Image (tube, rainbow, N blue to C red):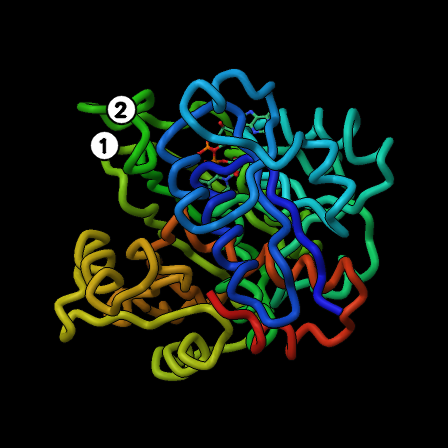
């Protein structure tokens, strides 16, 4: 029997998770919520998705949309809810709607780890989400860090990590955030990303710093990793090539920037031009030979899409599908 999934919050993340759910053979999309009328509602209607109101139906009816019910109806019809509402609303919905209704729910990286007590990246800790009622998918940055660091940790062992996140100022469709003409450092040490990585990779010692720049396409991370075992650049390239949801990109392909990576994704015909894999630049992988064996690399993270396959695998884990590797292989996105 297909797993019945409801999506609450149909914005940047919610609309992508809805499309991904609709693509999976073992899942059925029950519908999505509309908080207010927008072009997103028109897209959901055009795709034939059922629309459930999250804030009354007046705005929708005024614009010619006949909703299929309200959010409580969606919760009744679904086995599990993926909540992709803005920061803090997911936690409120968890307490006010999902727990009283005894429905399983996933919240996103805008919420804190303590909201669910379990944080998830499929290739790192699939089993921790098995049969759980409430799980958080970590943020786009944390997902990117966890994917590559998990691969490095399993092969070489990590003594410690320092990573800097050069973050896009806003998503492409966001007209409210910036910066437009500044580089803005995060004035807290460490930035929240390091402790967030430890909610998934519990034993990795990591210190992070972050800053925002005027770009919308992707984040860029620079990492310095002290390894427990010696490594060679070629072996690290092979490791990343063979790891889940990581892509090696190269100067020779003219993939020298976040702009060219997104153009590449568009040209590959990816839905919305998404690049859910973490892209590591081959020529920017380096090793310094000192007593600690330092590995350096740079990676690009497509913030709008890297967490989408994680939501799909998490649904399976929470619904009791035991084989994490099989789930990762099954997931279409
Ligand atoms: P968004 O603003 O693009 O979309 C949120 C949607 O929720 C909007 O359509 C809004 O109308 C709707 N909404 C607001 N209040 C609601 C309510 N009470 N009930 C139902 N719907 C409601 O936000 P987003 O960027 O998709 O972020 C959602 C979550 O995903 C956040 O926790 C965020 O931190 C996380 N996240 C975002 C990104 C990103 O780059 N955009 C990446 C990873 C994780």
Residue 27 drawn at (x, y percent): 64, 63
Residue 188 visible in the displayed image: yes
The answer to which of marks 1 and 2 sits earlier in the sequence is 2
36 vs 115, left or right, is: left
Q: Nearer the viewer, residue 16 or 263?
A: 16
Q: Nearer the viewer, residue 304 or 146?
A: 304
Q: Is residue 262 above or below residue 231?
A: above
Residue for badge 1: 214
Please report the residue visible at 44 percent of the width from the left and 42 percent of the height from the top: 45
* Alpha carbon distance from label 1 to label 2: 5 Å
Residue for badge 2: 179
Residue 15 drawn at (x, y percent): 47, 45
Q: Is residue 303 above or below residue 37?
A: below
**Mark 2 neighbour density, 10 Å: few (under 14) some (14–19) many (20 or more):** some
| CB atoms of marks 1 and 2 within 8 Å | yes
Identify the element where label 1 is drawn.
loop
Residue 311 drawn at (x, y percent): 60, 55
**Mark 1 neighbour density, 10 Å: few (under 14) some (14–19) many (20 or more):** some
Mark 2: C-beta under 8 Å from nearest atom of ligand 1: no
How many badges with numbers are in the image? 2
Please report the residue visible at 48 percent of the width from the left and 18 percent of the height from the top: 59
């Amino acid at each position: 029997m297909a797993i019945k999934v409801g999506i609450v919050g149909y914005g940047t993340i919610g609309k992508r998770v809805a499309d991904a759910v609709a693509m999976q053979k073992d899942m059925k999309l029950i519908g999505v919520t509309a908080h207010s009328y927008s072009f997103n509602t028109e897209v959901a209607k055009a795709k034939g998705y059922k629309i459930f109101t999250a804030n009354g139906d007046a705005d929708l009816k005024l614009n010619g949309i006949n909703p299929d019910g309200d959010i409580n109806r969606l919760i009744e019809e679904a086995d599990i809810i993926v909540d992709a509402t803005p920061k803090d609303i997911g936690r409120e919905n968890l307490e006010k709607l999902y727990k009283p209704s005894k429905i399983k729910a996933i919240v996103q990286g805008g919420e804190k780890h303590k909201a669910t007590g379990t944080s998830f990246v499929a290739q790192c800790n699939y089993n921790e989400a098995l049969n759980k009622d409430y799980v958080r998918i970590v943020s786009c940055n944390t997902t990117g860090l966890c994917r590559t660091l998990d691969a490095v940790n399993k092969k070489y062992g990590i003594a410690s990590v320092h990573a800097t996140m050069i973050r896009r100022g806003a998503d492409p469709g966001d007209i409210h955030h910036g910066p437009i003409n500044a580089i803005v450092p995060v004035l807290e040490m460490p930035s929240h990303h390091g402790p967030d990585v430890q909610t998934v990779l519990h034993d990795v010692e990591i210190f992070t710093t972050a800053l925002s720049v005027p770009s919308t396409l992707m984040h860029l991370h620079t990492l310095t990793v002290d390894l427990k075992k010696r490594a060679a650049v070629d072996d690290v390239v092979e490791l990343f090539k063979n790891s889940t949801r990581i892509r090696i990109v190269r100067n020779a392909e003219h993939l020298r920037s976040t702009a060219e990576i997104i153009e590449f994704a568009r040209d590959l015909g990816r839905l919305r031009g998404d690049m859910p894999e973490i892209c590591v630049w081959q020529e920017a992988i380096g090793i310094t030979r000192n007593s600690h064996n330092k590995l350096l690399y740079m990676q690009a993270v497509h913030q709008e899409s890297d967490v989408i396959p994680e939501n799909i695998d998490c649904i399976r884990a929470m619904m009791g599908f035991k084989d994490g590797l099989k789930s990762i292989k099954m997931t279409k996105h």
